[in-house]
Amino acid sequence: MRDVALPTYTAKDFVTDQDVRWCPGCGDYAILKAVQKSLPKLERKKEDFVFVSGIGCAARFPYYMNTYGMHSIHGRAPAFATGMKVANPDLDVWVVSGDGDLLSIGGNHTMHVFRRNVDINILLLNNRIYGLTKGQYSPTSEIGKKTKSSPMGSVDYPVNPLTLALGAGCTFVARCIDIDAPMMDTLMQRAAAHRGTSLIEVYQDCNIYNHQAWFYASQRESRPDNTVVLEHGKPLIYGKDKDKGLRLNGHHIEAVHLGKGITEDDLIIHDETNRVLAYMLAEMSCPDLPEPLGVIHAAETRPPYEQMLHKQVKQAMEKAGPADPKALIRGGVTWTIGANGSA
Amino acid sequence: MTPQTETPPGKATPIESVAIRFCGDSGDGMQLTGGQFTDTSAMFGNDIATFPDFPAEIRAPRGTTYGVSAFQVQFAATDIHTPGDRINALIAMNPAGLKTNIEDVESGGIVIVNEDEFTPSNLRKAGYAEGENPLDDPELSLHYRVFRVPMSRMTRESLADSGMGSKDVDRCRNMYALGIVYWLYDRSIDPTVKFLENQFTKRGKPEIATINIRALKAGYYFGETAELFPVRYRVAPAQFKPGTYRKISGNEATALGCLIAAHKAGKPLTYASYPITPASEILHLLSSLKHFGAKTFQAEDEIAAVCAAIGAAYAGDMALTGSSGPGIALKGEAISLAVMLELPLVIIDVQRAGPATGMPTKTEQADLMLAMWGRPSESPAAIIAPQSPADCFAAAIEAFRMAVRGMCPVLLLTDGYIANGAEPWLLPDLDDIPPIKVEHPTQNNNPDGSFLPYLRNPETLARPWAIPGVPGLEHRVGGLEKKDGTGNVSYDPDNHDHMIRARAAKIQKLVDLVPPLTVRGPEKGDVLLLGWGGTYGAITTAGERLRAQGHKVATAHLRYLNPMPANLGDVIANYRTIVVPEINMGQLRSIIRDRFLVDAVGINQMRGKMFQVDMLVERTLEIMKR
């Protein structure tokens, strides 16, 4: 519903005059570019966008977006975003932050924003390391990882952002890779259209402290065999020669080679609306199974939090009629003292 | 038939003020009983002040001392400021209640006990030695006028033909006790009859109303016919300013004040909070006022609550968060962000006894330094501390006025004592409250066509409150230091020094909204009792008493802690000794000594309770002798 025609935006309209200060070669550059390119296609007014972040390298994002924005405190971006939507549900709120910010210090808020299904979009730039604090292991770092704070190898098991989101009730869960601008564009548009919380996990390369962490999934040679691109209603096929597939064996997903009696009909057909399937797909990890990319789960099964909140307020106001502040402060029992000072 | 409750004049002994306390098990309905006596007295025209005192345990084991719930009310024919130091009459529904409250009864005071509950098992639970019954102790009758009333049995007997189960019948004991007290103090039972009818009819339980009313009347008639009490007392109505009054607690007044502030600003209120004693009631109240546009967000934790409030402020709502000390500590970093973002935010701190979990249902005023300094780096915020339950209303409105004008966080420091206590409130004429002027820019403020989010108003030093949704004013705010004007990230040393000073100066500019400090008593003299917050009633009463004894003692109360009234230094200079009574180790005293280089003396007591006026008087006299 637009009462006036939208201006035609280009990516340039979303670029600020601030110098981008990420390390040269950082995966964040590609993501910033992809986002700036996608926004003009979303058919939203530029002034309705708010980019909110926490702390970390990724959290510098809002400074580079020529929209409204808030660079907040460590881990709390989902809470700020929730408050913005409570105040004004018409805003198009995007949280952009890293794995340390959203999954470690801010894990609690991330879980609760998923649970409430606040209509915001979250770009989780996952580089599996603390970059801004110069290279400690993060909550997505693999066990045994040697860093400045884990010289003998980390003894922390990593969290999987996708299964965490699904477990907490997130209604849109997707994943892509920093250098894959076309997929990023597709997912941005899907996320923007989704009513409810949407999570896009982005495999992002930190070329200083965790370079090549995702190369097994991001490079031309490695990607086809180590990832599978999900398409709703299509069989799960992957591999350089599109000759591998995923099928169900009892309660497990197994990788199979097509041919020798195995056909596409044997494979799992992706169904975005199936949360159980989504969970199984989200659990897949290399080297055993290819890691899923694209939309893992999308289902508008529940109304967003702020929508229900505003509905309750509206209903209460309609039922009570015009607000009367005088009646409000009177409350229940009152008594009057006459001019002579007696009751 | 409604009994004739008005005693012929002359039969009851007139008395200026009475403090009574109802106590019993947490399940005995003592809060409701005390609340009813308060309402009836208020409607009769007495001045009232209440002090509900309940355990943190929701259902502590029956009969134990830690499960005792009490409600104290002072009602008076004169202007009073406290629920009273000493109790004139104690109504104890069980041995544990008697044990924990008897010390506060004045010598020769009335003690009415439900003797049926003084069973061996209840005595044991209350911690009395085997075979010991305090009612049999001659000392008790020596010090107090003890009335042993078999309330449980008489309630049962009076409802024997009601056909109701023993559980429902036994629950009417508190109404029986209330009936006795109504008779003793010559009060009409009609308001409570009406209350019971409304209350239970609404819930579709008229039979419960009936038995409660019958028990109430039975208690009243018992007082009349048993001739147990040699005298009755009558507290005449107080002289009030003409107008319409209601009873209000501090938490109620805070919630209403915030809503009216939003109304005066013409904006919606968003309250983001996490449940915590003793502040939760504000969340409950605002959640029930959705029809007035109140939006409430019960966050996942204290930090999320303040962050959501800041998000709401950025998006243009009147933003509020609230908690108690432990929660305010958690909110510290986010409040410092609000300082940096320069957004209007009101933070309620209903102070309680600490540290850590402390005594959550007990009062204290030890968060002043937390409010003043409890954030990283230089993070100044305005601070207002209401001085009585009803004063929370005006203070909440002023807090929003300051927040909007200064584009800054404002802390509203109430405490458990005024939050739960109640007093009569002369309903203000809302038209007399000036609007809160909010301006959201719609145009660029820079000749070059750009928008400067940190361009300060030269008068207030506040930045413009530009909100998302307005084309052309897109801007970023954040926790990194800002270049003044552009709001861009800046590590420039001179700019940082300038910004710290600007944020501090902006708070001090709010002094325009702070009225000069007024003094009760002599304008110059020996002692100034200088207090802040919930101790107003006790300190004011102590000052009145000291002056009545001929001492040159004045009292003054700081409602504004930051900025402080401009004339505070002049006031302080007028007295030989500055005495600062506080329910903490001397936090305001430190500030006063620091700011004014005056050798202020403290009266400090942290018992989880309001000061006793007697104690303040004694300690002040001691200080004067030095």
Image (cartoon, rainbow, N blue to C red):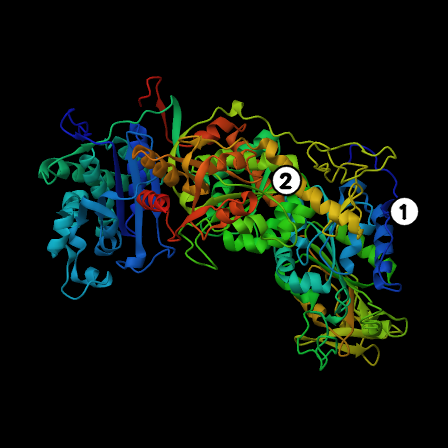
Which of B278 and A268 lies nearest the eye of the viewer?
B278
Amino acid residing under circle 1: Lys
Residue linked to disc 1 = A12
- Name the amino acid type tagged 2: Ile
Tell me the SS state at disc 2.
helix
Q: Can residue A295 be seen in this view?
A: no
Q: How crowded is mark 2: few (under 14 residues within 10 Å), some or many (20 or more)?
A: many
Q: How far apart are marks 1 and 2 (CA)?
A: 39 Å
User: Which quarter of the image is occupied by the N terminus of chain A?
Assistant: top right
Q: Mark 1 lies on which chain?
A: A
- B353 vs B229, left or right, is right
Q: Which mark is residue B507?
A: 2
Disc 1, SS? helix
In depth, the one of A179 and A328 nearer the eye is A328
- Quarter of image, res A27: bottom right
Asked if B37 appears above or below A108 in the picture, the reply is above
Q: Residue B353, percent across and down?
A: 43, 54
Say if residue B380 shows up in the picture: yes
Quarter-of-image position of residue B80: top left
Give how far across and how far down residue A341 sits, in percent: 33, 21
Task: Give percent across and percent down for residue B13.
Answer: 16, 30
Whole-percent x, y for residue B286 in the image: 51, 41
